[in-house]
Amino acid sequence: MSAPQRCPCGSGDDYDSCCGRFHGGEPAPTAEALMRSRFTAFAMGDAAYLTRTWHSAQRPRRLDLDPSLRWLRLDIVDIVAGGPFDTTGIVEFRAHHRSADRRGVLHERSRFVRENGAWFYVDGTTPRT
């Protein structure tokens, strides 16, 4: 029997008890949990989950993930609201990635909204540094 797979989101938990349960259909309880599960979906190439958790007002018609991009690490920088009793939230993060010829960091301040008990990604802006 193999050891449980660590979750790519960086929580330290195994995938099944962390983001795997959200990928399996359980709603994320907070905006941060949704952000982490979306990072994990990018890392695992799960475009269907990303589409499902994107707010319908902003959701792209098609989502093509770059298979040569490898998502390495997620750092949460700031969280504003987005708790289990909130209806909106903001999560600022840095997502480290690598392609065949370079490394990079996506720094985004993402907005989330909770509707009918489920969190959705709305959009994001790039903070000035």
Image (cartoon, rainbow, N blue to C red):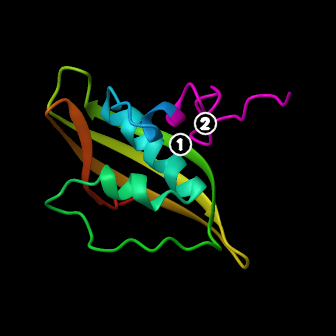
Residue 65 forms part of the magenta stretch:
no
Q: How many marks?
A: 2
Q: Earlier in the sequence, mark 1 or mark 2?
A: 2
Secondary structure under tag 1 reads strand
Q: Which residue is mark 1?
A: 75
The answer to which quarter of the image holds residue 97 is bottom right
Image quadrant for the N terminus?
top right
- The answer to whether the residues at label 1 and label 2 have Cβ atoms under 8 Å apart is yes
Secondary structure under tag 2 reads loop
Q: Which residues are magenta?
A: 1-20
Judged left or right of residue 72, residue 108 is left
Point out residue 35 in the picture as x, y percentages from the top left corner. 40, 42
Judged left or right of residue 20, residue 72 is right
Point out residue 67 in the picture as x, y percentages from the top left corner. 61, 72
Q: Which residue is mark 2?
A: 10
Q: Amino acid at mark 1?
A: Asp
